Amino acid sequence: MALNLGVFDSVVPTTKLDRVIRTWTAADITGRQGDAVRAHSIRAAAIAHVICMELHAQRRIPEWSVLGALLHDVFKLRQLKVIISNPSNLMAFLDTLSVNQGRFLTARGWNASIVNAASAAGHEILPRFIRRPSSIPLECRIVFYADLVVSNGGFVTLIDRIASARERYARIDVEGQTFYHLDDRTYTVLERFADAVENDFAHCVNLTRQAFHAMIVDGAEHFLAHAGHRLSRSSP
């Protein structure tokens, strides 16, 4: 399935979709790996959009959620380079994550709500969940969850995605506990909060977690299938 940003033109102003492309370019998201990062981000944004529709999210939350999902992995290729060049340097890897990414996005002109949502994916948000889980904005919880149900060019369950993360990032699973001041291993804590977010979303629409996951995946696939019938703004 060819993926392009045009499918989001009913949710996000075209000027901001163009800025997404410019941001991806500035972050040097190129080549085969860049294609995978962009495809992952578009699928996560589709999940975010469907969740917003099902929850009847109001005001700017749908836009912030979609843009946060589109931008959440702008430093992914930098992370991969660190892992390849020095896999034992956890601090160098963590240095490429939310703080620097947030500064990068702010410098590219993105507002605080979008930067906050884009920084919500992965284990970087776990300290915030532990301190004050009720204070996490809806758009951040949506992006956090959307990222976790997209992997390797398709949609997955939380169980499969977190199992994969434990295997791929074994050092972070152990050492991240100390770095982030967590009460358990990194991906054990992440799983706990991911389960809670999925359960909350499912409860809001009166579905089981399994039925909720199936619904949003079906919705995202249907949404993306219509991408070719919308604007032809392809990702670079």
Image (cartoon, helix red, strand yellow):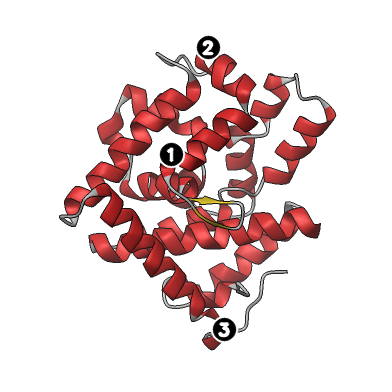
Image marks 2 and 1: residues in contact by CB distance under 8 Å: no
- Is residue 98 visible to us here? yes
Looking at the picture, how far across and down is residue 76, in whole percent? 67, 44
**Among numbered discs 2 and 1, the one appearing first in the sequence:** 1
Instruction: State the separation of the CA atoms marked 1 and 3.
Output: 31 Å
Q: Quadrant of the C terminus?
A: bottom right
Count the labels in the image.
3
Q: Where residue 174 appears, x then y in whole percent?
A: 56, 16
Nearer the observer, disc 3 or disc 2?
A: 3
Q: Which residue is mark 2?
A: 178
Residue in view at x 26 percent, y 63 percent: 54
Residues packed near mark 3 inside 10 Å, few (<14), some (14 to 19) or many (20 plus): some
Q: Earlier in the sequence, mark 1 or mark 3?
A: 1
Q: Which residue is mark 1?
A: 159
SS type, badge 1: helix
Q: Is residue 146 left or right of residue 39?
A: left
Amino acid type assigned to the residue bearing label 1 in the image: Ile
**Which residue lies at the image location 43% right of the left edge and 24% below the top edge?**
188
Q: Are marks 3 and 2 in contact (CB under 8 Å)?
A: no
Amino acid type shown at disc 3? Gly
Q: Is residue 3 left or right of residue 56?
A: right
Residue at x-position 29% and y-position 51%: 210
23 on left or right of 159? right
* Of labels 1 and 3, the one closer to you: 1
Q: In what quadrant of the picture does the N terminus appear? A: bottom right
Q: Which residue is mark 3?
A: 228
Task: Tell me the quarter of the picture where residue 175 sits.
Answer: top right
Is 84 left, or right, of 119 in this rendering?
right
